[in-house]
Image: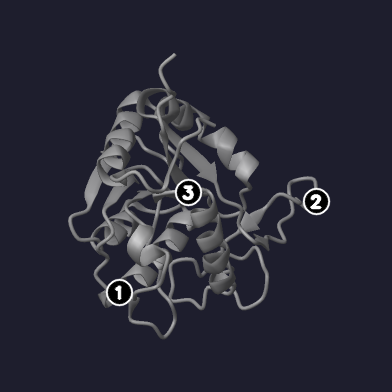
């Protein structure tokens, strides 16, 4: 029998108040198409910080995680999400992601919502020479993302050179399209896919999956950071 095709692996960064299992269910349509048609496997990253979030019944949700808080103390308050911020906890997340990225043999990142802000932080780190991002981060796919604005930093002026593809939902009410275009404008040579009826969600329709698959396949490149085993 012919050997199984090697799979390219991309680290998926879920959004605010999500868990890997919730992210897996919300991206199932996209991940199945990527695996079947492009031999690309999404590896679901675990964010290290718990969101002190309460569901409609008032009980604590043990599976709500985030990459950082928008307040100085752990809180579910997101009112400052678009303002310059300290991003409390982002350094721990960057350290955790460096380990998850390298240990899982990923070549790039697919990120949604707050995950996109965290991915943007990693791209700034790549420009600052921080490993493994400087030499091993080959691409980022942003969905429903917005730029990282570190309080006291000059990140707005940093040109990001990591190859990127930006999905922008024209009807996204959580992260307005102009915020997503702002992020797109910070990346050199960035590609964009606008979804006219797009909401704040990961697109799973065929045309979007093909675009993601083709983009990742074109950027993943050489043999390292690929997995010989088909998960």
Which element is circle 2 on? loop
Residue denoted by label 3:
105
Nearest to N terminus: mark 2 or mark 1? 2
Q: Which residue is mark 1?
A: 156
In the image shown, does 3 or 177 lie closer to the viewer?
3
Q: Quadrant of residue 220?
A: top left
Dot 3: what SS? loop
Mark 3 vs mark 1, foreground winner is 3
Q: Nearer the viewer, residue 34 or 83?
A: 34
Residue at image location 40% in from the left, 72% down from the top: 130
Residue 58: mark in rendering:
2
Q: Is residue 79 visible?
A: no
Quadrant (top left, top right, bottom left, bottom right) of the C terminus: top right
Q: Residues within 10 Å of mark 1 (few under 14, many from 20)?
A: some
Give the CA distance from mark 2 to mark 3. 39 Å
Q: Residue furthest top?
A: 1
Residue at 62 percent of width and 40 percent of height: 22
x then y, percent, for residue 10: 44, 45
Question: Where 43 sits versus 46, above or below?
Answer: above
In the rendered structure, which disc, 2 or 3, sits on the residue that comes first in sequence? 2
The answer to whether residue 64 is left or right of residue 161 is right
């Amino acid at each position: 029998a012919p050997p199984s095709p090697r799979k390219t692996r991309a680290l998926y960064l879920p959004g605010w108040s999500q868990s890997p299992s919730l992210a897996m269910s919300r991206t199932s349509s996209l991940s199945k198409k990527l695996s079947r048609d492009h031999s690309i496997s999404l590896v679901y990253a675990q964010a290290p910080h718990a969101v002190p979030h309460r569901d409609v019944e008032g009980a604590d949700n043990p599976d709500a995680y985030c990459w950082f808080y928008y307040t100085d103390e752990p809180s579910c308050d997101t009112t400052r999400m678009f303002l310059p911020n300290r991003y409390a906890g982002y350094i721990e997340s960057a350290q955790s992601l460096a380990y998850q990225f390298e240990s899982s043999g990923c070549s790039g990142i697919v990120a949604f919502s707050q995950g996109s802000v965290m991915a943007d932080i990693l791209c700034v780190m790549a420009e600052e020479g921080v490993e493994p991002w400087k030499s091993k981060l080959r691409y980022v796919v942003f969905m429903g993302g917005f730029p990282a604005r570190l309080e006291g930093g000059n990140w707005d002026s940093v040109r990001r050179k990591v190859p990127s593809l930006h999905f922008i939902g024209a009807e996204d009410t959580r992260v307005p399209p102009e915020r997503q275009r702002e992020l797109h404008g910070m990346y050199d040579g960035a590609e964009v896919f606008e979804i006219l009826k797009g909401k704040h969600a990961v697109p799973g329709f065929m045309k979007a999956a093909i675009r993601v698959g083709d983009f990742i396949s074109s950027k993943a490149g050489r043999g390292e950071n690929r997995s010989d085993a088909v998960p």
